[in-house]
Image: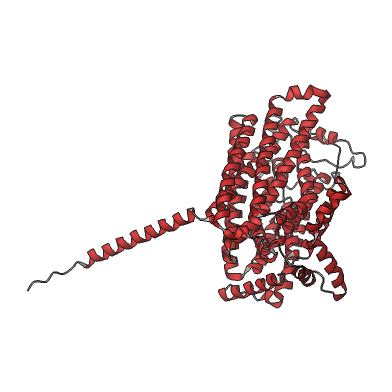
Amino acid sequence: MDFEIEDPSVSTSTHHSSNKKGGYMKSLDSTWKFLQSAHFFIYLTHLLSTWGDRMWHFAVSLFLVELYENSLLLPAVFGLAVSSSLILFGALVGNWVDSNTRMKVVQIALVIQNLSVTLCAVALMLLLVYKTQITILWNGWMKIVCYTLVIVIGVIADLASTAMSIAIQRDWIIVIAGDSDKLSSMNATMRQIDLLSKLLSPMAVGQIMTFSSSVVGCGFIAGWNLFSVCFEYLLLQKIYKMIPALARKGDNQTKEEEVSEGNETAFKDQENTSATVLVEGELINNKSTNHNHKETGCIKGILIPGIRTFRDGWIIYYRQPMFLAALGLSFLYMTVLGFDGITTGYAYAQGISSSVLSILVALSALTGLIGTMFFTILRKYCGLIHTGCFSSIVQITCLTLCIASVFAPGSPLDLNVPFYSSASDQLETYTTGVYPTDVSNASVTKPSPVRYDVTSQLPSNLTNTTEIKEYISIALYFAGAVSARVGLWSFDLTVTQLTQEMVHESKRGIVNGVQGSMNSIMDLLRFVMVIIMPAPEHFGILIILSVIFVSAGALLFFCFARKTLGKDLFKCVCMKEKHSENNKDAKVVAESIL
């Protein structure tokens, strides 16, 4: 009797192929669902927005430098105007975000931001083309009027961008995520998009300006914003329809909840309870009483409510349970250890070429991406607050290399050089290579300044024959600054999520608006310190001050962590059980304000 025996290898291979096919189809199906989800649309919207913002912020300084005959005066004035506007109007912008529906906020902010950038780009393009003709009009006053107009429109665009950022990254994303784990993942992804845009978009517009002209660069930025405003508008409308919860905004907080918030988070003294009730009641009724001020006159009706909103915003910010953590984050803005114009100028002064500097910028973006992944993993196992503590430790540890660079061979530190000299003295120094005569320190030997070639704007007296030891200092500086980005962005994401989870829905706008103002205050302080000590010989002092401020920010966060977790702060074990305990602690704090 014959039996047919099935080949086991054939059946096994058939089973494996069917499994592979099924897995492939499942993966394809999940990918297609993601591409149609609100998560993907919000990421795409954020990519378009940050790409345009990064291009504009990179290019506008170059345009202003070119307009003002290679002087840094206009970029400095523009930066000062932007920082000052955020300090003055941050609370007002945040309050406006809270006072209107979500869709109305993003519609208005999106249109104002993109149209303002487009107008600025067109105005700069005309100034670059007709610079000679405009200069002779009104004995030069026409040029000043045009510069002022560009700066004012640029400030309006930045304020609209702030409103857009608060609405999307501090409000919409919370509703879309739904829970803490998804919110953490979305925050990390949004930050990764931002870092990639910061790296790639300046390269794109830089290539356009290099191989064509600045005029073409202005036209490209204007065209991008006109395209972006339409596409972003459609995407935001689609997201708004996909997530019904976005149409419901929790702005009807009761008086009892407001009083409870003030009493539990800010004024624990029973003697101050009555004062707290009065202030909190005033904050609630602020929206309903603003229209009454119109009867007292137009100027008074606008000015008094604005001042009151400004004051109330800072009071509300101070009373939040994560106030110390948010204040610690703002301290990180008073630093010369970031990759901005100040860092670029110092690197050039130390003989670093533009190609090497671009590589270092790319490395900083890479370590920033690693920081976002570091945050996601660490939060999963140690909890949110412990992640902030570890991130601070990592950042400060890396910044010790920057401290070492101040005293390493090749450091330009020289305290004998006066802190401040006139513009003419600085011009003489950089053009002739000779320091102005200092009668009181005539016997002191002045260090040789860096000579610049006018055409290339790169140091000409620093060549490849420079001894290696002269680069030890700058190498340590960038090693510390680049590696510290891991802790920096992880800490930033920690405080961001704490703010998202602990601030009541009706207060998200004004709290984040004041947080932006606080960040701008520290950023403005940084510019003031650089103005006081502009010479490379004093940059070491600025490095030490930066590390002190970063350490102070970490100390404030540790105070917040100790206040929130108590003795559990020192019991962190990387286990999921511990993670759940920390989440419970965070939820208790969040529920205490509701």
For the point 77% across and 68% down, the residue is 255
Q: Is residue 403 visible?
A: no
- Please say which color scheme the image uses: secondary structure
Q: Nearer the viewer, residue 143 or 506?
A: 506
The x and y percentages for residue 467 are 67, 43
Say above or below: 594 vs 459.
Answer: below
Say above or below: 89 vs 209.
Answer: below
Figure quadrant of residue 143: top right
For the image, the number of numbered tags is 0
Q: Is residue 474 visible?
A: yes
- Which residue is outermost to the right? 440
- Which residue is outermost to the bottom? 567
The quadrant the C terminus occupies is: bottom right
For the point 83% across and 48% down, the residue is 302
Figure quadrant of residue 121: top right
Q: Nearer the viewer, residue 356 or 327?
A: 327
Figure quadrant of residue 290: bottom right
The x and y percentages for residue 490 are 63, 60
The x and y percentages for residue 31 are 45, 55
For the point 62% across and 33% down, the residue is 217
The quadrant the N terminus occupies is: bottom left
The x and y percentages for residue 20 are 34, 60
Q: Nearer the viewer, residue 154 or 100?
A: 100
Say above or below: 358 vs 492.
Answer: above
